[in-house]
Amino acid sequence: MPHSVELITTIAAALGLALIFGFVAVRLRLPALVGYLLAGIVIGPFTPGFVADTRLAGQLAEIGVMLLMFGVGLHFSLDDLLAVKKIALPGAVVQIAVATAMGLALASGWGWSLMAGIVFGLSLSVASTVVLLKALESRGALETPNGRIAVGWLVVEDLVMVLVLVLLPPLAGMFGGNGTPASTQSLLGTLALTLGEVALFIGLMLVVGRRLFPWLLWQVARTGSRELFTLCVVAAALGIAYGSSALFGVSFALGAFFAGMVLRESALSYRAAEESLPLRDAFAVLFFVSVGMLFDPRVLVEQPLQVLAVVAIIVFGKSLAAFLLVLAFRYPLNTALTVSASLAQIGEFSFILAGLGVALGVLPLAGQSLILAGALISIALNPLAFQMAEPLQQWIRARSKRARQLEQRDDPLAELPVGAASHTLTGHIVLAGYGRVGRRIAEALDSEGLPYVVAEQQREAVEKLRARGIHAVVGDASEPAVLIQAHVARARMLVIATPDTFRARRMIEIARTLNPRIDIVVRSHSADEAELLRREQAVEVLVGEQELANSMVRHVGQRIASHAADRP
């Protein structure tokens, strides 16, 4: 050929085979991402036949990570991040420590050095943000309380890994690796410098970025050019991600996430999310293909027991640690299971850390191969972990009295204060869910002077509501005990403001059992789900797009009527 076409060849082969294998996987009732991983193995350097450019595929995958994190930032406000800090920050740090200890113990049993065990354990401790986001989006759980906790948890993990990647070279030098040896004083200086750079980046994004980038997006939108608008969105996502890495040492993914958060301040954020969606999906597929390309199947034959041990730590060990941590913070069982499933895999940061460990001479090549094998297998199993969460929740509750008590044990937020629990609270409204939609409903109820009780899984939200004198209970409203504490039996209406249709059905059933005459209003994203709920449950269901259209039609009708009245 007259010129190099490696980029075109890599994209064409990756997307083409991903389509074929993804289609076959779906027809076999397997997750599509299993097909994407297999496509990567087929075009990888460790299998015969065509070999795609691994370096180019990795860079394309990095673009997918940035666009996906940018999309999450567009739907994830600073308030959402701060709302989960009390569980995400300590939970992520302790979980990383526990998983690292398990990896270190395993590596010590194999005769590896202390530094190799630490790097190995850290690589097993951090979950893939891309895999989590795809799993939450496919289940419509990204904007639920559980989804926000899981995303906040992984943001903290990413921040910890940024510090680890900066500190690893000097530490490697101290332990006989290829890095430059450093004293304790220089290590502390490096740590302080890194923390300062990250804080400066976040500060600039929240103070300057929240004003500058929404203004820029609005100026481009005023041109009326869809191409320019899309270009502005993509340029902002990739430009801020690259700039954050080059100037402040922040990862591409974290930079893109904060880029989305600042652009969320714009009224055009939903349009920005919609315009970038096709690119996000396409490049996210390339991420999974690139993971498959890194995998050498021979490790399954040569080191099967070691692979099983690594997978056990990833899927069971650190997930169990996270499960117990979430329960220790007195969150519901379903939150603990969601966070556990979210962490039952590893991904992009694990590859980077393992590669750096090998380059610095502190991690053997066998360790990198085991990490890659653990990543591929855990990513393939992750959809199954989410599917098992609900049956496992029912199984645990049915067989463990202790598990049922954990959610309601002498928790002051799990029941209303004595005054509110009296029979004076009658004919009120029970509001299930206090997210963005729930907060607006509560504001409207306050303005109308209508009494209501909020049932919400976020402890911090319930604490703030209680401080304002608003009746609220913490817990999953799909559990009878929570709706009982909200006095649904004496309520005149139940408003379900959470997007989880499965749990909404359970709330309806429980409310109707306790109060057969109660009126119920449900929020839904899907017109098909809405119609099914109306037909099966005989409830009022409001669909976001449909209600927006109805409001616009009413507005148009009112304006036409007013113009007609003004005519002589």
Image (cartoon, grey):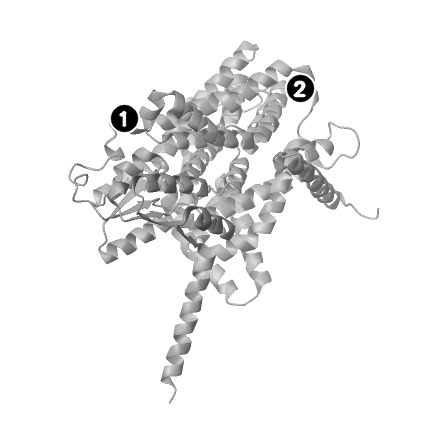
Question: How far from the left and from the top, in percent, is residue 211?
Answer: 41, 56
Residue farthest toward the bottom in the current orientation of the protein? 568
Provide the secondary structure element on which disc 2 rests: helix
Q: What residue did someone put label 1 on?
A: 409
Crowdedness of circle 2 by 10 Å Cα count: few (<14), some, many (20+)?
some
- Cβ atoms under marks 2 and 1 closer than 8 Å: no
Q: Residue 307: image x %, image y %?
A: 60, 18
Work out which quarter of the rendered image holds the C terminus and state it. bottom left
The reply, left or right, for residue 163 in relation to residue 235 is left
**Does residue 240 appear left or right of residue 156 in this picture?**
right
Q: Nearer the viewer, residue 283 or 545?
A: 545
Which element is circle 1 on?
loop
Q: Is residue 421 left or right of residue 213?
A: left
**Amino acid residing under circle 1:** Arg
Q: Is residue 175 above or below residue 522?
A: above
Q: CA distance from mark 2 to mark 1?
A: 46 Å
Whole-percent x and y of residue 285?
63, 41
Residue 37 seen in the figure: yes
Q: Which mark is residue 176?
A: none
Residue labelled with disc 2: 300
Of tags 2 and 1, the one toward the viewer is 1
How far across and down, in percent of the image, does residue 471 sit? 23, 43
Q: Residue at x 53, y 25 (%)?
A: 123
456 sits left or right of 134 in the view: left
Q: Going 55% across and 33% down the picture, which residue do you hit? A: 383
